Amino acid sequence: MPMGNGRLGMMVYGGVEYERLQLSEESMWSGYETDNDNPECREHLDQMRRLLFEGKIAEAEELCTRYLVCRGKGSAASADGEPYGSFQPAGDITVEMSGFADAICVSDGYRRELDLFDGVATVTFGNVVRRHFVSEKYEIAITEITGPENQELKIRFDPAQKNAGYEYLQDGILVTGRFAGQGAVSYATCIRVEAARVSIGGSFDSGGIFAGGSCIRIYAATETDYHARGTCDPAVTARACVDAAVAAGAEKIAKEHIAHHRSVMERCYVDFGPGRTDLPTDKRMEAIRKGENDSGFSALYFSFGRYLLMSCSRGKLPSNLQGIWARDCCPPWSADFHININLQMMYWPAEVTGLSEYAEPFFAYIEDLASHGARTAEVQYGCSGWVAPTIANAHGFTAPGEHPSWGAFACAGAWCCRHLWEHYLYTKDKDFLRRYYPIMRDSARFFLDFLVTDPRNGYLVTAPSNSPENHYVDPVTGKAVAMCAGPTMDNTILAELFDTVTEAAAILGEDRELSARIRAAREKLPPLRIGRSGRILEWQEEYEEVEPGHRHMSHLYGLYPAGMITEKGTPELFHAARASLRHRLEGGGGHTGWSLAWIVNFWARLFDGNAAEEALRQLYGRSTYRNLFDHHPPVFFQIDGNFGATAGIAEMLIQSHEEEIRVLPSLPDAWQDGSFSGLRARGGYTVSAAWSAGKITALEVTADLDGELKLIADGVHYRRRMHGGERCRLIG
């Protein structure tokens, strides 16, 4: 059961004789900042482009493999001591029960529960109750164990890092250490125990804290010097956190934590009926796999996604691939920040589900990417502005990865910029736009320099480039290749970026000459094209696909997350997008959790609620662990799919990307009765609704700002001038 305050994380594993509590902290990153930009790349760009334009794709790919890569080992060397590094856990608190075996009776009502709205995990059996939570205000993880008076516990902490220093305090433990490398992060974990009886004994290997009494409390804090490198002592900070929490008292902290957590969770909820609430979560999932309908499970999954975002994105860094719960010191893909969809997907539900402030770490991270990516733009590509390809870490890595087929997606940073614009669309906050506009602008400046005219058709294209992680068959050699010029995803992202930058400049009254250049470049981008099969082309040519069911569906970016393909505005592309999605699914697409989550959003935008709900059922059935974490084959979890599916459920209930709000645009037959409250719409609106037999029975809209409301519900168009703070009941 995952818990966290956005920065400090705790995974509650559960048990009887033993309870394992994994601690983590967002900036527990090995590695350090290095220069990985490759100056040889810019020297060979013209040659790479010439080969691509001449149709010598295999030769171009060979050249890209040599030079369109980072310098050094990059992410391939993510172990401790290597510069790229990886996110790492702090360690495990182990609680061992002894001395009252009669109280240990698993058959006597053993229950594990995570209350998503209180942010409290509870384990109960016999007369024992274990309660866990992580306080945002006090930056502390607290475990409270109540039982009989003769309760005796042994508590120890095993740091994940082998070279950590370990010492006993009067009533606790202090672990300190530093990752390898110049400028690497220092860290400290402090644990303190409150009980009627506390003693310290034994060596590190066999000893621990011995506590007895009917109520035993464990306070744990982990700190690093990541954000103030070398100017603070994590050990001092960690001990101060624990001291402040003990002084405040666990009861007071718990009361404040629950009140705050509930206030945020209650901003937004969905209800599709009770479902099989008589069953525990794992049994409900088994029933869904067997075909049983459980509409309430989607509401649970929706709330869990919002809970996860609250729990792992309130510090200084955004959520990584595994949130703040990676259990390994060398986790898959370093548990880093993949920005060719994964990091972006994690923040799809932030605005629409009322968690706008929980996207702030992502915004700050984009700002950091831009500062490092300016050097990459100059050194790697010889361009102004900034760029950040596929992978990024906590130390400013913005170079391409080790292989261009997956690591040289130059539009990844530009994709991040859409989240800055989306925040403005939802809030209309000009101060926010003024702060982040330079980042959007400088991303566009990079592409003004990087784009090149394709001599075959006269369009401005990105070259060399790729359609993220996908391959096609080289018509000359028959080889599987990835490098190309002007893939559809690049063209769509850049059309969106150029449009938003010029609109933002007009709103702020800035950069008229630059805006004119951007508009001129926008007109020369390749348009979306439909192939002979009636599907949207992924590349500029109608190449044979190596993997028709590839997990990335990059050529449908214009359908979702962008709103450039719509039934009303681009009907031919709209139907071609549907054909493209069906083709992907027929080829076996959606075989990873996050890919299935993307499919949910596609079907929602295509107004096919039943297909979207079926994709959700597949996600629950084959790509979700028993604790509801998203499953990424072969054996590990990622939580991007959790967030993507949460956004997809919201998209089935409300859409606002066409300058009007649609209520229940993609309602499936399985959700014929239900309600939602607090979903947000672009333009600064909050919407709540209820429906019965698929017909809306209540609809209420609240406006943040003065403006004209445009809304469609049950086929009826509503137009109304609203003032900031006004609440309007349209139905019921």
Image: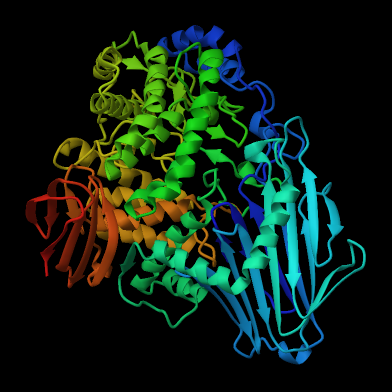
The residue positioned 48% from the left and 61% from the top of the image is 622
Q: How is colour applied across the structure in the image?
A: rainbow
The residue positioned 26% from the left and 15% from the top of the image is 512
Q: Nearer the viewer, residue 406 or 700?
A: 700
Left or right: where 44 falls relative to 657: right
Left or right: where 167 falls relative to 47: right
In the rendered image, the residue lying farthest to the front is 247
Classify 527 as above or below 190.
above
Q: Nearer the viewer, residue 472 or 407?
A: 407
Work out which quarter of the rendered image holds the C terminus and state it. bottom left
Classify 492 as above or below 590.
above
Work out which quarter of the rendered image holds the N terminus and state it. bottom right
The residue positioned 47% from the left and 68% from the top of the image is 116
Question: Is residue 328 visible from the viewing direction of this image?
Answer: no
Q: Nearer the viewer, residue 675 or 260?
A: 260
Whole-percent x and y of residue 547? 45, 38
Whole-percent x and y of residue 177? 79, 46
